[in-house]
Image (tube, rainbow, N blue to C red):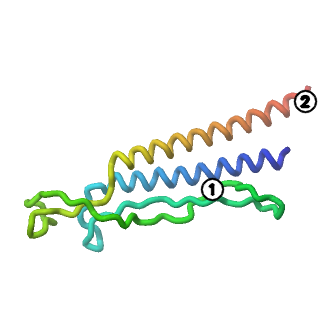
Amino acid sequence: MASTLSSAINASASALDAQRARMEVAVSNLANAESTRGPDGQPYRRRAVVLESVQADTPFSVQAAGVRVAEIVQDTSDFRRRYEPSHPDADENGFVAVPNVDVPEEMVDMLGAARAYQANLTAIGLIRDTVQRALDLARS
């Protein structure tokens, strides 16, 4: 049973790390939603977190034992264009290339990550409470 509880805690802990990464990337995307020129001279490109399952360490298990960030990738979709002829980065037609960040989408991603983070904290708390109750029963 201890191995099962430990595996459950490890799975939830790995999910906490993954959700934290999702929130950090969403915050970065939101902070740069209007950045029209980066170090490379191009607008900011939206970033996304790619998650992958982590397999159990035992040779007989085929179940996922957690999750981890596989990579953080740049969204290669086209930049949005906005007509703003007075902007220093406007082209000859008055259009400015702005980041491919959709603010409402980022807010939804951040909310989803925050809720998943909270759910995993709750799961860890329930496991801790279950272990504590078992220890209390064993003492009586």
**In the depicted structure, whether residue 111 falls above or below residue 66:** above
Going 44% across and 56% down the picture, which residue do you hit?
A: 25
Mark 1 nearby-residue class (10 Å; few <14, some 14–19, many ≥20): many
Mark-to-mark CA distance, 2 and 1: 36 Å
Q: Quadrant of residue 38?
A: bottom left
Q: Quadrant of residue 75?
A: bottom left
- Compared across the picture, whether 73 is left or right of 121 comes to left
Of the numbered discs in the image, which one, if any, rests on residue 67?
1
- Residue closer to the observer: 137 or 78: 78
- Indicate which label's residue lies in the foreground, 2 or 1: 1
Q: Position of residue 7 (x, y in %)?
A: 75, 50
- Compared across the picture, whether 62 is left or right of 123 comes to right
- Compared across the picture, whether 108 is left or right of 116 comes to left
Q: Quadrant of the C terminus?
A: top right
Mark 2 vs 1, N-terminal side: 1
| Mark 2 lies on residue | 139
Q: Position of residue 122 (x, y in %)?
A: 63, 37
Identify the amino acid type marked 1.
Val
Going 51% across and 55% down the picture, which residue do you hit?
A: 21
Q: Secondary structure at mark 2?
A: helix
Identify the amino acid type marked 2.
Arg
Going 80% across and 58% down the picture, which residue do you hit?
A: 61
**In the depicted structure, whether residue 124 falls above or below residue 40:** above
Mark 2 nearby-residue class (10 Å; few <14, some 14–19, many ≥20): few
Residue closest to the far bottom: 40
